[in-house]
Amino acid sequence: MAKPVIITVDDDAEVLHAVERDLRSRYGERYRVLRADSGAAALEALKALKRRNDSVGLLLADQRMPQMTGVEFLGQAMEFFPNAKRVLLTAYADTDAAIRAINDARIHHYLLKPWDPPEENLYPVLDDLLEDWMASFRPPFEGVRVLGTRWSPHSYAIRDFLTRNQSPYQWIDVEMAEQNAEARRLVKAVGAEASSLPKVLFPDGSSLADPSTAQLAEKLGLRVRPEMAFYDLVIVGGGPAGLAAAVYGASEGLRTVLIEMEAPGGQAGMSSRIENYLGFPSGLSGGDLARRAVAQARRFGVEILAPQQVAAVRVEDHSRIVKLAEGTEVGCKVLLIATGVSYRKLDVPGAERLQGSGVYYGSAMTEAMACKDEDVYIIGGANSAGQAAMYFSRYARRVVMLVRGGSLSASMSQYLIDQIKNTPNIQVETYARVEEVFGDQHLEALSIHCGDSGETERVPANSLFVFIGAEPNTDWLAGVVARDERGFILTGTDLLRDGKRPQGWPLARDPYWTETSVPGIFAAGDVRHGSVKRVASGVGEGSIAVQFIHQYLSAV
Ligand SMILES: Cc1cc2nc3c(=O)[nH]c(=O)nc-3n(C[C@H](O)[C@H](O)[C@H](O)COP(=O)(O)OP(=O)(O)OC[C@H]3O[C@@H](n4cnc5c(N)ncnc54)[C@H](O)[C@@H]3O)c2cc1C
């Protein structure tokens, strides 16, 4: 934890130096002692400390300074650090003014110059004040802070990125600043005008206004550039399948790099509670699973590049070369594609415009606290929608699940159906379809068509979470590997037509189970045609793929 600060202010350099020396010798071990030669400079220093979320325990200011008196400075300093103890240093002649300041300007104490010996005239008073301050001191949050507004898609994207990259942060909604004095002080210190929002503040005192995820990644020290030009194994996609393959590949001696365009964890990382993954009887969150898997992969020496998107792939003899969206190329002996699926978008009027401003895909966890005591709408009837409903039911006043079919049983695991039934604030509406979403700056209402009554109703709503199935994003592989009509990658026997190997297949053996129509390019997890869309099966496929990768490598 950073040490709390003591600031001393005086325009007389000699006096300033002497006070600083005495403060340091007594408090230097527990406090950072700073000095300023004017009230204005001290106020600037206080603003910078506020931006870094530092704490200030004591302000000691000389009364007679040109431009700004000590009393004036101490009064203004309260706008940033109202709990800091305020002490005025005065000459004997100013005693009356100092006493008045105690009454009028809420100054805690005044000290007379000279204060020698400090053991008698300075420390007893300051000890007492600092002890008092320490008794109610709460260490401040020391990580990244995000200032923005709830309905801004950019603020949402930044929070989502930080959450999914396991980077703790504090969220400060500037629209709530009127009700939160500490937030108001910070907004004032930062000068957070609307045009600079969202703003991300870092513990080193620096900040980024409306940063891209690439800028954030760089600032947070996430690795986005490959260390080498050529690897044994390149894995595209950091979901359960890619992470499992990375762990098995690297632990079995393959120089492995995993490239992930958002955050390691994949879809599973968005899950609020995975309850059916072997070995975790009380379930675990997707974020937790991702964190453990990333640690395990790193322990075996896997290089993880994120966020970094792979945009193209080509084959050159025995090398497979992927091209990153920013242009860099990375070569490898074997490529594993584990890019999963992404959410299908809600295709109704208003949905695209309000994405991130009330209409969300998947990411339940970032928004949950903001939905406290509100009504939340969820579209979808599969496990992912069920998990989200359970998660939101802990915060929201009411969760309404809008399900296209007649019941949940066709698409949801029984354990979740039972949990939902036993949760009084979840309401399941069957044969229900959202027809349009409304709102100016953010979502304000939905129109819902009820198949039973044939009627369409408009309801007020601030949050709509959409879980309506998913599709693979494999267009970047077009013309390279064979895919089915929906874009899923064909592997193994699915590539054989009437027992014949795929066109252009050069080897005297059939493709392995997880091998694509190009030898040395493999696919695992949800992106693979015919896969079971589950965390455990993704993990299984990723690890099995590595066995076939070894067999492939032993023959080239
Ligand atoms: C909310 C939710 C809850 C779920 N709950 C459960 C559950 O309880 N139990 C269960 O068994 N299953 C659950 N699932 C399903 C499970 O999460 C998936 O089956 C599993 O994550 C699939 O793993 P994967 O590695 O194949 O793909 P994904 O998890 O989809 O990961 C693919 C990764 O590839 C990345 N990527 C895509 N394209 C590129 C590119 N071009 N360049 C770089 N990276 C790229 C993506 O960003 C993504 O991170 C849930 C899914 C969701 C969405």
Image (cartoon, rainbow, N blue to C red):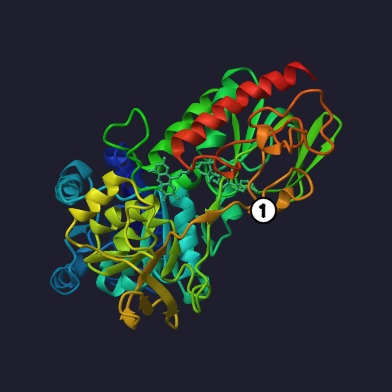
Q: Position of residue 199 (x, y in %)?
A: 48, 64
Q: Is residue 418 left or right of residue 468?
A: left
Q: Tell me the residue that label 1 is attached to.
A: 485
Q: Residue at x 15, y 68 (%)?
A: 102
Dot 1 alpha-carbon crowd within 10 angstroms: few under 14, some 14 to 19, many 20 or more: few
Q: Name above or below for residue 207 compared with residue 102.
A: above
Q: Residue at x 42, y 71 (%)?
A: 151
Asked whether 236 or 387 is in front, the reply is 387
Numbered disc 1: secondary structure = loop
Q: Could you say which quadrant of the image residue 72 lies in? A: bottom left
Q: Name above or below for residue 337 compared with residue 351.
A: above
Q: Is residue 455 left or right of residue 360?
A: left
Q: Position of residue 253 (x, y in %)?
A: 63, 18
Count of residue discs: 1
Disc 1 residue type? Glu
Q: Position of residue 521 (x, y in %)?
A: 72, 34
Q: Could you say which quadrant of the image residue 523 lies in? A: top right
Instruction: Give the residue at the far front of this rendering.
Output: 498
Q: Name above or below for residue 44 compared with residue 279.
A: below
Asked whether 460 or 25 is in front, the reply is 460
Q: Residue at x 51, y 36 (%)?
A: 538
Q: Position of residue 370 (x, y in %)?
A: 31, 64
Decide if residue 78 is in sight here: no
